[in-house]
Amino acid sequence: MANSPTGDSVTERLLRVLETFTPTRTVQTASQIGRRAGLPSSTAHRFIGELIETGLLERDEDHRIRVGMRLWELATRSSAALRLRQAAMPAMERVQARVGEHTQLAILEQGEALFLERLSSPDATSNITRIAGRLPLHASSSGLVLLAHAPAELQERILTGPLAALARATITEPAALRRKLAEIRRLGHAIAPGYIEDVATGLAVPVRDASGAVVAALSVVIARDAAVEAPLEALHRASRDIQGALQA
Ligand code: PHB
């Protein structure tokens, strides 16, 4: 891709612009995008204008800019995530109906848990996961399941730390994290009481494809003091159902 006067390729510049949008920052002005992407003002305005013309970004009535539906459409259409989400949806709905709490599907993406789907209920326990949001591997139930089955290289990198304390009970000692990962492999699920939020416990199971490889984690978030047996049973059953759906 041709380089700009500032030395970055168009692809790099596009990525920098898109990455200024986050789960909590979904609308911005062109100037804010330019500043956050490190682009000179005139370049930013011209480039953002081109992206709006192609539909990758959209401008609302107040002239604020958001990610365009065209980008969502193109990204979603043929992704592996879509197939996984479709295979998982019926089982996730059963878990959500049975447990009555938030139910999430996450995959391992560049050293973090990336959430593809979340089903909520109005009076469910507090939950900080968001669709297309990320959580650290060592501090969430989904992340721990994904890490326990990740390539050894990634496990060692995370185990080298630092392991940020996100709540009072987050595992921050590498030796304790190593023991936790072994426990998750032995039990077939992760229990994460207060690891990321003092008030909540995350429960997660691995989701496997037809070959038995772990491709995702399915989780529920319950109140810190709630019983774990029934939700875990629902998760294990759902995981088997999703594996079956992925085989079909
Ligand atoms: C978890 O998966 O451990 C988890 C996720 C989000 C929360 C609480 C716990 O809000």
Image (cartoon, rainbow, N blue to C red):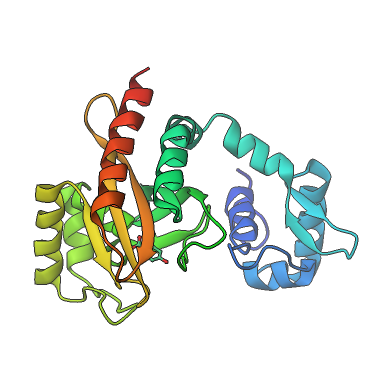
Viewer-proximal residue, 136 or 236?
236
| Res 225 → quadrant | bottom left
Extreme-top residue of the structure: 248
Residue at 26% across, 58% down: 228
Q: Position of residue 80 (x, y in %)?
A: 46, 32
Extreme-bottom residue of the structure: 168
Viewer-proximal residue, 39 or 209?
209
**Taking the image as four quarters, which one is ligand 1 found in?**
bottom left
Q: Is 38 displayed left or right of 28 in the figure?
A: left
Q: Is 111 displayed left or right of 46 in the figure?
A: left
Residue at 65% across, 59% down: 17
Q: Position of residue 167 (x, y in %)?
A: 33, 79
Q: Quadrant of the C terminus?
A: top left
Q: Is 132 displayed left or right of 240 in the figure?
A: right
Q: Position of residue 35 (x, y in %)?
A: 69, 73
Q: Quadrant of the N terminus?
A: top right
Q: Is residue 222 above or below residue 96?
A: below
| Res 215 → quadrant | top left
Q: Is 110 displayed left or right of 162 in the figure?
A: right
Residue at 25% across, 74% down: 163
Residue at 16% across, 59% down: 156
